[in-house]
Amino acid sequence: MLPERPETGALPARVRAYIAALEAELARLRPDASAERVAASVAEVAGPAQLISISKAGFAKRTPRHLYGRQRRSGMGIFDLELRGSDVPELLALAGDDQHLLLVTSRGRAHRLAVNSLPATPVRGRGHVLAELVPLEADENICCALVVPDSGYVAFASVEGFVRMLPAHLLGDQLRPALEVLDVMLYGAPAAACVVESGADVLVATSGGRAIRFAAKLIGAPGVQSIRLENGEQVVGLAAVTNESQLFVLGADGHGSVRPMNNFASNKAPGAGGKLLFKTARLVSIACVHADGDLFVISRLCKLIRFAVAEVPASNGVVHGVDCMALRADETVALAASEGIHAASNGG
């Protein structure tokens, strides 16, 4: 019997890729092995090793991804963050130990945080006070969290639909402390952020389930108003997409769907009303996914579920989606998506 795999997140990317290749060869030589289990095993080595959970009150927890076992879609999940009082989960992010997170606050300011500066915490734990690691004001909270990219751009969207884009090099080692990435007095608090590569489109989604897609190159230096909001809705999601992208959409009721982007046409310009992306009373979040990746979804009561993207049927039409998480007097609040085996391996 093979021993249980140790944590590999601290190993260099080349070493993790080599281990992934060895496990793939083992799968080929052992036809009796479960293909699903081997695939999941390789993905754990190749992909980002840590799941970061962040609460509204500013507690952050770093937990090895492999400690969250994959469940079937529509399961109850397990308890993750251990919060007190009225505090609730706010964000999920996947990152490697050797990477940095870009944290955007409710004041529109950006901070860099080394992932390994967060103390490792068990699955059910409270985590660490972020204000001890980044300079936050008393009434300031984290609105967006993503891995700092090596190249390309990072786009930021406000709750009122304003989108701005900055080159990645301004957000790396040379990031000016508390750099203002959005003017919250003019455009509202940050709602979402994403990495944008050359030639991609951006898709902006609202709480009403509507979205607009347009070429990222149309976002000038000052930024643009991306979508015309209606009926009190706010922007809740931002993603960089191409016609080959698959977009997972999640409602507060735990229903989700995968929308192929080759069936969601790009607008010639930003600023229009968009069109319906997903039938839901309230859209919570969106994320680009890979067919062999996993989804992590957390609820307001701190229940977290991990399940395979492949369990969610793709639909070219506007649908209500399928049950992704069983909820009882609860609602989903955030999600994170892991890349597929091949995508993660190529990304190092």
Image: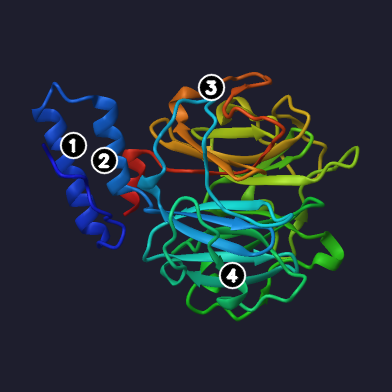
Which residue, given by chain and number where applicable, does mark 1 sit on?
Answer: 24
Would you identify the image quadrant in which residue 11 lies?
Answer: bottom left
Residue under the image location 67 percent in, 19 percent down: 319
- Comparing 106 with 133, the one in front is 133
Q: What amino acid type should be assigned to the residue bearing mark 1? A: Ala
Contact (Cβ within 8 Å) of mark 1 with mark 2: yes
Q: Is residue 235 above or below residue 183?
A: above
Q: Earlier in the sequence, mark 4 or mark 2?
A: 2
Question: For the view shown, which residue lies furthest in the left direction?
Answer: 29
- Comparing 320 with 276, the one in front is 320
Separation of residues labelled 4 and 3 (CA atoms): 39 Å
Q: What amino acid type should be assigned to the residue bearing mark 3? A: Ala
Q: Taking 92 as reference, is 49 left or right?
A: left
Residue 42's tag is 2
Residue 314's tag is 3
Q: Residues within 10 Å of mark 3 (few under 14, many from 20)?
A: some
Residue 129's tag is 4
Q: Is residue 168 above or below residue 173?
A: above
